[in-house]
Image (cartoon, rainbow, N blue to C red):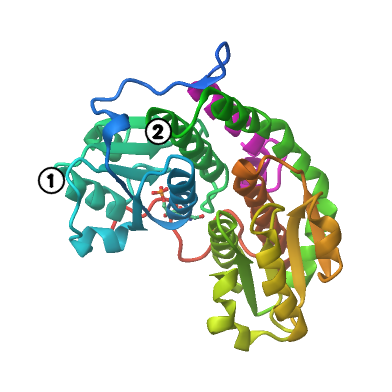
């Protein structure tokens, strides 16, 4: 049941801390505080590249994974949505690792892309919530997200569990490739182990998120902006808003704004910015200043370090818990998913069963 929550989505949002913790328990040895992967029938230390594919939210998790694998493990990564990947017939570097991401393990396009990779001779690693699924059966190795059943059509906890697995996979591959020493691993593992309690702290911002939702609920169109690993979080926020509130939302890489979408900006198109403190903070801030100068209403998700500089320009600033820059996308995700949920409540839509959508898309 819903355990007293109004919707499965609300219940599942509140399971973020638990699910992140359970997933970490499966991947980190508490004694050594190191990531331990299960036996795999291929050698992650020698893969020349990874090619990631998935659909919807799972694809956005993959995009965060690409930023991590490239930056931390220095592994070249290709990524595309599965409905494109399956027909692109890309030249695949022999020995590349095919990484599939899916909550259900049954999504038709992702399964077809998996089989395409397999036919091309790639080793297949799937990140799945349903560990007994079609994708599980066709994979060489599976990393499970320990999210439990996800009932709400809009994915929430499965997404942060996917990010948690991708973060651990990144650490393991980085170590094997000689890109991460023991101190480096200790730092990133600590950041991950800190997450369940920091994730729980996000719920203390409920009132501020509801206030932000009252602005978003009045809009016909909403622009989401972010840079780096906060860009796929913006994409996830925009998808979730479209899905359950039926408000049109688009996510752009903040630096792309001046190449087109800036012409949309006026008082009627609020901008939701995902902008954690860190190396890209100033860059994103200057994009937001440009948007503001054109009359944009800025609604920002940052952290305690970014709060003062953002609140100088934004109509509303939410300072989410400050965490290690590595794991900011996981904390920011909870914020944008809660914003979508609160907006849908104001719109009075059918949150758990949005029109036209199915939980598992098993036909092309
Ligand atoms: O079961 P999967 O993870 O393969 O599903 C992929 C997408 O259909 C799914 O993430 C969809 O985009 C969600 N409704 C997003 O909230």
| Residue 45 within the magenta-colored segment of the rendering | no
* Residue count near mark 2 (Cα–Cα under 10 Å), binned few <14, some 14–19, many ≥20: many
Residue drawn at 55 percent across, 70 percent down? 252
Judge: label 2 CB < 8 Å from ligand 1: no
Query: Range of the magenta residues?
Result: 1-28
Looking at the picture, tell me which residue is in the foreground, 121 or 9: 121
Q: Quadrant of residue 184?
A: top right
Quadrant housing the N terminus: top right
Q: Residues within 10 Å of mark 1 (few under 14, many from 20)?
A: few
Q: What residue appears at the point 68 percent right and 35 percent down from the top-left corner?
A: 3
Residue 193 quadrant = top right
Placement of 290 over or under 245, stated as above or below: below
Q: Which mark is residue 119?
A: 1
Above or below, 145 against 322 in this view is: above
Residue at the location (27% across, 28% down)? 43
Callout in the foreground (1, 2): 2
User: Is residue 270 placed above or below 101 in the rendered structure?
Assistant: below
Query: x%, y% of residue 300?
Result: 75, 63
Q: Is residue 30 left or right of residue 347?
A: left
Q: Is mark 1 within 8 Å of ligand 1?
A: no
């Amino acid at each position: 049941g819903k355990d007293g929550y109004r919707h499965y989505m609300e219940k599942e949002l509140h399971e973020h801390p638990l699910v992140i913790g359970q997933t970490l328990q499966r991947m980190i040895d508490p004694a050594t505080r190191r990531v331990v992967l299960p036996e795999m029938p291929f050698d992650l230390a020698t893969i020349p590249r990874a090619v990631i594919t998935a659909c919807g939210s799972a694809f956005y998790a993959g995009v965060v994974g690409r930023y991590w694998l490239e930056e931390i493990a220095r592994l070249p990564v290709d990524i595309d949505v599965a409905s494109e990947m399956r027909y692109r017939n890309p030249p695949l570097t022999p020995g590349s690792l095919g990484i599939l991401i899916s909550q259900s393990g049954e999504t038709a396009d992702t399964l077809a892309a998996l089989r395409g990779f397999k036919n091309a001779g790639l080793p297949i690693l799937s990140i799945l919530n349903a560990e007994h699924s079609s994708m599980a059966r066709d994979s060489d190795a599976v990393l499970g997200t320990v999210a439990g059943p996800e009932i709400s059509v809009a994915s929430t906890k499965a997404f942060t569990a996917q990010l948690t697995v991708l973060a651990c996979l990144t650490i393991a591959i980085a170590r094997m490739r000689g890109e991460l020493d023991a101190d480096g691993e200790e730092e990133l593992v600590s950041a991950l182990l800190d997450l369940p309690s920091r994730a729980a702290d996000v719920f203390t911002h409920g009132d501020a998120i509801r206030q932000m939702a009252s602005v978003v609920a009045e809009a016909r169109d909403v622009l989401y902006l972010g840079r780096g690993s906060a860009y796929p979080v913006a994409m996830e926020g925009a998808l979730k808003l479209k899905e359950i509130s039926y408000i049109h939302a688009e996510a752009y890489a903040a630096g792309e704004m001046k190449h087109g979408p800036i012409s949309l900006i006026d008082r009627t198109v609020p901008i939701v910015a995902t902008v954690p403190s860190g190396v890209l903070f100033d860059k994103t801030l200057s994009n937001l200043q440009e948007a503001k100068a054109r009359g944009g209403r800025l609604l920002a998700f940052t952290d305690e370090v970014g709060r003062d500089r953002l609140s100088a320009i934004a109509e509303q600033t939410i300072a989410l818990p400050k965490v290690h820059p590595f794991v900011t996308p996981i904390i920011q995700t909870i914020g944008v998913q809660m914003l979508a949920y609160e907006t849908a409540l104001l719109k009075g839509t059918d949150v758990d069963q949005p029109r036209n959508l199915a939980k598992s898309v098993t036909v092309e």
